[in-house]
Image (cartoon, helix red, strand yellow):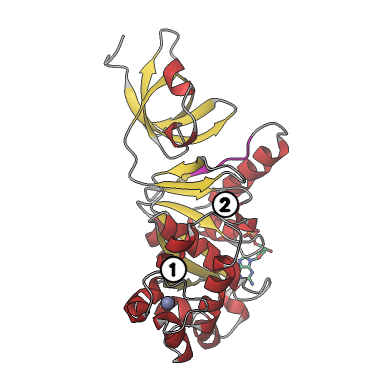
């Protein structure tokens, strides 16, 4: 019974306890995995964001029978093991959200989120919300280091309706992980982009966290403009996502132009003499705050 007219492909929106919610022709259906796929562990496993093949059963339900190739994956290593755990597949954007005030920006968290994106090969941008609480010039100055590093920074206000259209344009057609500490306005931004969206994201996070035995996992929310927003409960307080020490400098794009200036090939850019990165920091070419974040991450136990 394969390849029938009732077979289809769809995108996995979420999975809870072995039940996969798959979007197919604009509606959601709940499916189980066919035997062989159930055995998969780690990155072989069907993940939120995957495009899967579905087979319609005689009783009208669908089962997932196959997995299409992924264009990217967002993953982490499990706390003490080496196994890679996939969080979401096919994520191609990361929006790191902060506010200018109430709460104050956590620059070290933003830097971690950007490293997470870089290490997974995902394009990142910043959303600086609550711009109504600060002068725009001052806010631009505080976040200039990210623009210098090559990141796009959107300055938004839900309250004053600033740059909401621009955010919507950035999300359209992409699968975007929207992440940042609580209270910065993520749900408000999503509701402004698409009425009801932020509410839905919040509801699912709460529901998943309440279930004692369910693993809190990512979920995808379809956008009217095309694409999806990915919600990952608990990622805001993210612990370190392992990046091999030798790869960490590559996750700071503004270092790249100076790496040729390092005397040692295996320079860690922390204490070596003749380091191109350290001298660029001294010369004011690389932001001191961003460099300090790098040193902090490089000195963590990984
Ligand atoms: P989340 O935890 O990141 O989802 O944040 P929420 O969307 O729940 O917003 C937290 C608080 O910030 C709420 O009281 C919002 O009304 C408020 N807020 C959201 N966006 C803005 C904004 O642009 N300006 C101001 N002044 N407050 C905002
Ligand atoms: Zn160096």
Of the pair 200 and 76, the residue shown nearer to us = 76
Q: Quadrant of the N terminus?
A: top left
- Check disc 2: other Cα within 10 Å, few if <14, some if 14-19, many if 20+: many
In the figure, is residue 280 to the left or right of 101? Answer: left
Which of discs 2 and 1 lies nearer the camera? The answer is 1
Main SS category, magenta section = loop
Side (left or right) of 289 relative to 117: right
* Residue of label 2: 198
- Please identify the residue farthest to the bottom as the structure is shown: 283
For label 2, the SS is helix
Q: Residue at x 55, y 80 (%)?
A: 289
Query: Which image quadrant: the C terminus?
Result: bottom right
Instruction: Residue at 42%, 54% (x, y): give it.
Output: 120
Identified at 41% across, 71% down, the residue is 151
Up-down relation of residue 234 to residue 132 (above or below): above
Indicate whether residue 217 is drawn in magenta.
yes
Q: What percent of the width, then of the height, locates residue 135? A: 57, 86
First to last magenta residue range: 215-220
Q: Is residue 36 above or below residue 152?
A: above
Q: Which mark is residue 190?
A: none
For mark 1, does the 10 Å Cα neighbourhood hold few (<14), some (14 to 19), or many (20 or more) residues? many
Q: Which of marks 1 and 2 precedes in the sequence?
A: 2
Residue 158 visible in the snapshot: no
Q: What residue is disc 1 on?
A: 249
Residue 231 in the image, given as x and y percentages of width and height: 54, 48
Is 207 or 48 nearer to us in this picture? 48
Mark 2 → mark 1, Cα distance in angstroms: 35 Å
Is residue 3 part of the magenta span, yes or no?
Answer: no
Judged from the image, the secondary structure of the residue bearing numbered disc 1 is helix
């Amino acid at each position: 019974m394969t390849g029938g007219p009732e077979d289809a492909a769809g995108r996995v929106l979420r999975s809870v306890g072995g039940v996969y919610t798959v979007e197919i022709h604009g509606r959601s259906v709940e499916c189980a995995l066919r035997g062989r796929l159930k055995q998969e562990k780690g990155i072989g496993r069907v993940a939120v964001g995957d495009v899967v093949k579905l087979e319609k059963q005689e009783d009208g339900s669908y089962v997932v029978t196959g997995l299409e190739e992924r264009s990217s994956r967002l993953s982490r290593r499990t706390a003490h093991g080496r196994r890679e755990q996939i969080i979401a597949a096919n994520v191609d954007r990361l929006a790191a959200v902060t506010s200018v005030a109430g709460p104050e920006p956590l620059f070290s968290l933003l830097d971690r989120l950007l490293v997470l994106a870089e290490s997974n090969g995902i394009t990142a941008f910043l959303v600086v919300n609550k711009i109504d609480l600060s002068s725009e010039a001052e806010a631009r100055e505080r976040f200039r280091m990210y623009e210098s590093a090559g990141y796009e920074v959107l300055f938004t206000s839900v309250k004053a309706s600033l740059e909401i259209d621009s955010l919507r344009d950035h999300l359209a057609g992409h699968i975007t992980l929207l992440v940042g500490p609580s209270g910065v306005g993520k749900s408000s931004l999503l509701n402004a982009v698409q009425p009801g969206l932020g509410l839905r994201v919040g509801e699912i996070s709460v529901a998943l966290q309440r279930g004692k035995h369910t693993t809190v996992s990512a979920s995808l929310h379809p956008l009217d403009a095309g694409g999806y927003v990915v919600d990952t409960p608990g990622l805001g307080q993210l612990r370190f996502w392992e990046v091999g020490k030798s790869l960490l400098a590559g996750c700071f794009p503004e270092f790249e132009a100076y790496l040729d200036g390092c005397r040692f090939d295996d320079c860690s850019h922390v204490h070596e003499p003749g380091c191109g990165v350290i001298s660029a920091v001294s010369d004011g070419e690389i932001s001191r705050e961003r460099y300090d974040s790098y040193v902090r991450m490089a000195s963590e136990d990984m």
